[in-house]
Each structure stands twice: as structure tokens, then as C-alpha cells.
Image (spheres, coloured by chain):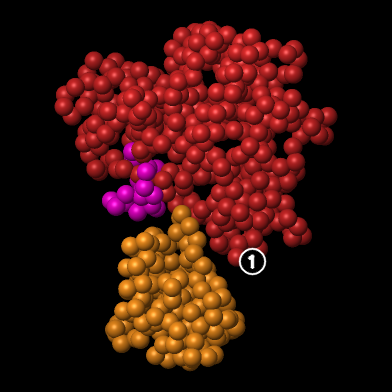
Amino acid sequence: MPLSYPSLSHPASHAWTRTKASLFDVGHMVQYHISGPGAEGFLERITPMGVRELGTGEGGLSVLLRAGGGGVVDDCLVTRLEGEGEEGLFYLVANAGCREKDYKFLCEEVEKWVGSGGAEVRVRHLQDRGKAYGLLALQGPLAGEILGEALARECRVDLKTWYFGRAKHITLKLATGESLPIVASRGGYTGEDGFELSVHPSQTLAVAEALLESAGKERLQLAGLGARDSLRLEAGMCLYGHDLDEDTTPVEASLSWIIPKRRRTLQGSEGRFNGAETIIPQLTPKSKGGAGVSKRRVGLVVEGAPAREGAEVVDEAGGAVGKVTSGCPSPTLGKNIAMAYVKDGLHKIGTSLQVVVRGKKRRAVVTKMPFVPSRYWKGGATPG
Amino acid sequence: MRRRRAALEKKYTEDHEWIDISSPESASIGISTYAAKALGDVVYVELPTVDTEVNKGDAIGAVESVKSASDIMTPVGGTIIEVNSVLEEKPGTINKSPEGDGWLAKIKVTDTTELEGLMDAEAYRAFTEEVEDK
């Protein structure tokens, strides 16, 4: 995927995604199927997710965790595609930059799982004859109507009751008149309503062309990595390798919300996730008898110059208290936004800090994320 | 009335800055058309402070797109005598006219022999073509 396409500059493409719809070729992401009688238990070992509670088609954001320290190996999307109970078919989407590392991690974890008496689990990279499945992200307020028009006549899916985080088998109509069954999840990485379409490698181009053609260029445009990065930052989402890494636990990353109540216990040796012995005590602050954390991911709004990755965060007295991990001028807000890790205690909304850019201190205020309100499809209102 | 920009005599650096060498007492500095294109839509410009004394190669400001920030290095040493405040309100001026209205600062050149090592327009064009080929 290029930074931008010739038809729209990066800021224009960003604004287009917030007002109309964009199509992102995110086929560099790595898609897996995880199946077998041990799949559910295995996923509850490597992620802190409530996998057992996932109904068919339900899914969400989670993280792959390293045993012991609980560092984040990668962030990922996990969805139950088929089956109830332990024997299910799960769909996992992970980052391209972690391809080799994730693969090695998954292989080692399967070995450990089976070695410790876990039921059989199969991990399969989604590909056909060496070619990875394509992934297209259709994002923006017009995404729903555009997808609706691209569905084949026989596809009876109801977009109004297809909520954020749900995956469905749908059938698209291609320009040739053929119908193509695919798997699509409602969600994405922009904070807008949208869909991620997982497509057989031989059909990805045909699907992209069908969507672009049926939507028309006044509604749908191709968008690149530049817009993807500034959109996700406005939406308060982490970029692995920048805002998340193996030295960071989900609690430090302010991702405690991805750990449901059932999984927040160290009682009994059954069903613990990797790193639980580190992560669960962190969930309770030091002041309340827990281990707490020493750093936390926060949002910042920075005055004057935009703060970029690596910029130092200092307190009023000038002492170093953290580092910026992502930052840019927000095209939607016209303010400089950033994510940073700061010392625990300085993470409260409204805390006044400073960020050093080109040797000068710039005022920064801890700000609630998402910076731009998300508009996921959660039902209630009518689309449009 | 627009001033005739073609009359300016410019020299360029390998970091894609230009300097107007026709009046070393008050020489305009900016970024090249090539650099402005490569950077994309400029959304923020940081200007130097008037009266600052600088050495050749010092960062005197920065231009930023949504994606990235680039420092601007002064092609020669001297004293900053004026800055183009228009860029604070309208940073896009750099994209519209990088080698004209989008000038960044004016410098009083300390040592005019420093101008001699810079590329003229033709040499700079050849330099950017070489960069493109790599």
C-alpha cells in the first residue's frame, strides 16, 4: 500500500474517509484460521480475551501475550467464525510487521499447549497455493450503503442489525455478474463505520474493482498508509511497534478494557492467560494493594509544533516523565495530537505536561482518546 | 503587482534549501520546489527568531506535513533579519510558491564566500535527477 494515491493527497484522503468512504488494501495483514477441539482454550491461553463467551460471528480486539512478563507480542482481531463451545473455527488477523515473530510464537505456544495436555489445535495461515488471502478495508460513513449496493441479490444480510465487531458470510456481486461468497467483519482501524473483507487471493482485485465501480468515484476513493495512520491516531488506536511492544503490558497500554471480568483472576490454575501473574496484579493500583503500573499510555494535545515519535515528555519542573510514541497534526481537529507513555499518576485527563520538540518545550495536555469520536455501527439510529 | 521572481539568482543545497544570493545583506531562504513536492501538503511551519545568529548548516526551522517533519538548515551563516510570518497562518503557501511567496526567512550573510560552495539551478536539477534515479 502506498502512502497515498495520486487522486487525493494525504490530508484530502483523510478528510474523505471521515465524510465519504475509502478503500484500503490491507492485504499485508496476516490472517489465520485457528480450529480444533482445543482452539477456544488455546486462544484463552495466548490472549486475555473472553473467547468462551464469543457467539458465532462475534469478535474484537485483543493481544497476543508473552508468558511470564505479559508483554504484548502483537495486537490482533479475534473472531469466532463457526461453532459454539470449545470446538470452533476462529479467525485471527495480526500485523504484517510481526509476521515471522507471530508465526514462531504461535507454533511454540501450540507445542506448549499440546505438551501440557491441551486438546488438538490447528493454526493455519489463510492462503491458497502460497498466496495470502486479500484484506480490503471499506471505511467511512458511506461504507454501509456502498457495501449494501455491492451485495449479490441472493445475499440476505441486514446491514441495520449487523453491528460493530460482528463477522458475517456475505455474497458480493462482481462486475462479471458472478457472485462471490466472502467473510466480512464490521469494524476497522479508522474510528468510522466500515467493513474488512477477507477475500481469496485470486478475487481481491475483482472485489476492489467491483466496489470502486459500483460506488463511483464521488463516494469511494482508494486510500493509503498515510491516511490510515492519521485516522487511527485520531481514533486513539495503537500502532504495534510504536505504541505497543513486548516491553509493554496491556494495563500499561491502557488496554485493560480488553480483559473481561471473568479473566481477571489468579484463582485456580485452569484457564490462566500468558502473563496473568504479572498483568492481573497490575489491574489494581498500588494505593489499593495491587502492583499497579509505573507508566501508562495517554493521549496528548500539544500546542505549537506537532510532537512526533521519540519526543520527550517533561513535567512542569522540566524532569523527564515519558516519551511520545506517535503524533501528528490532526487533520480533523486542526490540533496536534499524540500518544505517549507517561509516569503513572500523570495520566489523568487534564494533566498539564510539556513535550520537547526541536529543543523547545511545548505545552501538552493529557486528553481523552479517541480524539475524534468513533462512529461505529452499534445500532439505534438509522444509517445515513 | 507581482515582483519578477525570475530575476532572483538562487543557489541550492543538497538538503533542498535555496538562498537568493543577489543581496547578501538580506538574502531570502526557502525550500526548493522539489522538496515541497516531496513533502506534500505543509500544515505547520516553524520559523526562526529574528536576530538569531546562525552557522552554516544549523537548523533554523521546520516544515511539517501530517506525515512527517523536516528541519530547514541554513545554507550559510549569518543573522536572521526577517521571517515570513504569513507561513504561520498559511503554511500551504510553501506548496503554492516554494521558491517565491513561500520564503521562510531573510538572512544577513556573514561570509559571502560560503555561497560559493552551493549549487546553481542547473547543478541542483541534475542533483535531484540523480537522487530520483537512486
Q: Is residue A53 left or right of residue A31?
A: right
Residue at point 39%, 67% (across, down):
B35
**The quadrant where residue A163 appears:** top left
Point 29% across, 26% down: residue:
A148
Tell me which chain appears orange: B
Q: Is residue B57 magenta?
A: no
Say which residue label 1 marks: A359
Q: Quadrant of the C terminus of chain A?
A: top left
The chain to which mark 1 is attached is: A
Q: Is residue A133 visible?
A: no
The range drawn in magenta is: A1-23
Q: Residue at x 51, y 44 (%)?
A: A233
Amino acid, disc 1: Gly
Query: B126 or A54: nearer the eye?
Result: B126
Residue A309 in the image: above or below residue A98: below
Quarter of the N terminus of chain A within the rendering:
top left
Is residue A96 found left or right of A2 in the rendered image? Answer: right
- In x, y percent, where is residue A326? 56, 49
Residue A207 in the image, given as x and y percentages of width and height: 27, 30
The answer to whether B60 appears left or right of B125 in the picture is right
**Residue A10, magenta (yes or no):** yes
Q: Colour of chain A?
A: red
Relative to B2, A166 lies left or right: right
Taking the image as drawn, is residue A219 in sight? yes
**Mark 1 secondary-structure assignment:** loop
